[in-house]
Amino acid sequence: MTVTTDNDSYVFQGLIDRKLPEVQGGKGCKIIVEKNGKVHEDIFDGITGAAVGALGWGDEDIHGIMSEAAKTHTYTFPSLIGNPQSEELAKFYIDNSPEGVFASALWCCSGSEANENAMKIIRQYQVERGQSKRTKIISRESSYHGFTLGALSISHNPRAEQFKEILLDQKELCLKMPVCYPYRFMKKGETEEEYSARLIDSLEKLILDNDPTTISVVLVETLPGSSLGTTPPPKGYLSGIRRICNKYDIVFMLDEVMCGTGRSNPNGKLNCWENFLTPEEAPDIQSVGKTLGSGYVTIAGVLVSPKIKKAYVEGTNMVIGSHTYASHGFNCAVALGVQKKILGNGLTKNIFEKGNLMGAKLQEALLKEDNIVGDVRGIGGFWSLEFVKDRATKEPFPYKTDVAHRFEAICFENGINVMGMQGNIDFVSGDIALLAPSFIITEDDVATIVERVTKSVNDLTAELKAEGLF
């Protein structure tokens, strides 16, 4: 179907002078998209925005959930007065995490906001317990924690590089430890455990070189997303960071904004780190978001451990100030309804199983053939492809070839929506594509994803061969 549209945009995002493709509607795993005057009615949503979707689109219960939330909602400013919906959502998340791991939660409106708040919570925690010298934040090279200036300061990627002149101090305050990237940086003959030990040694050296009594927090993404492409941590890596944090009395934080809240949990619950850590090794603080509200409301959050809560309670017992829409009653009520339906219908279990099936089938379909895919990696409902010019040497394509976005465009023409990203290796080179379908996918949906992605890989491989680039 072709429609006539005014392509001038009044929204300051994406391409400034014209509209991006626009979603006209969606049902389940499919979306209807108008692009360049043509309506595409059979697009399988393989990325759900930015790994946001859980229930799929047009869920039959969501209007009822929203209607009930609206009936009781009265806006409250959280530093002055609370609401039961935010309390109930916090208790739900705590109760559906391993016992004793979390004791409190703060709800906000985006992952960037969640990570900003986490940094302030950690800072006050150190002050509350008489450790005001602990100001330094250690995060990773090739990481992404959000698009606000504070979140970009603790990130390390091309998006952060654009604003380096106005970021928080990168030499004395926001320190960076080596990236964890087995596909590229694990040495030949090195085991996962040996690679992890090498990275942990680098972290400890960084701590010692910068005075352990001044280090406040070590922060990593459990399963990276747009920065690196769903690289699972090697054996012993996260537990090694936990051990080092315990040794030097440093806060251990995990960012699960993109990978968490049920997308990659092995136990039918919520947290991705349960693939790698015992409850005793759990993070002291954790950011969450994305699938929390399944895209129906804007919500993210910070989960706080008993240790951190205790320091506050025994200190000033308060947080001064708040974001206007923190702990928003309507958003919390809708997110709680979404999460109850997800767990009630076993959808976290479903996405873990079907997502791993999708990943295994993509590996089988792509890695045995001569094409541009060098690696297929992920966990549960969060996977990525990495494209290379030479599989043996892992040589990336030149930046100007823009393989990631060309792949994204070909996928769309073949009826599947994915996210293409560049710069995962060194801020310039490196091409990846991300997949994060809704939790409701079936085996037939998995077959559709694999078929359309495989066709797109083959189509782009043929194009690059014809151009003499592969």
Image (tube, grey):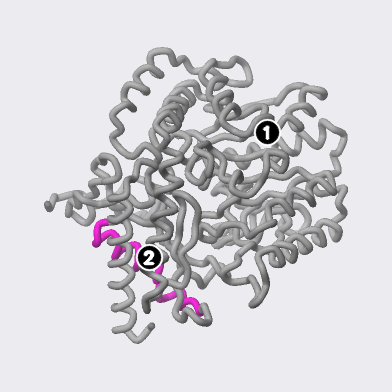
Percent position of residue 156, x then y: 62, 59
Residue 148 at x, y percent in the picture: 57, 46
**Could you give the CA–CA distance between mark 1 and mark 2, rounded to whole angstroms?**
40 Å
Drawn side of residue 418 relative to residue 230, left or right: left
Report the span colored magenta.
395-415
Instruction: Give the residue displayed 77% in from the left and 34% down from the top.
Output: 125
Q: Position of residue 192 (x, y in %)?
A: 65, 65
Three-letter residue code for mark 2? His
Residue 26 is drawn in which quadrant?
Answer: top left
User: Callout 2: helix, strand or loop?
Assistant: helix
Q: Eyeballing the image, is 200 above or below 319?
A: below
Of callouts 1 and 2, which one flags the residue occurring earlier in the amino acid sequence?
A: 1
Query: In the image, is 326 to the left or to the right of 48?
Result: right
Look at mark 2 in the image and give the residue it sits on.
Answer: 405
The quadrant of the rendering that contains the C terminus is bottom left
Q: Are the residues at dot 1 and dot 2 in contact (C-beta closer than 8 Å)?
A: no
What residue is drawn where x is 72% and y is 45%? 252
- Determine whether, in the image, residue 70 is placed left or right of residue 194: left
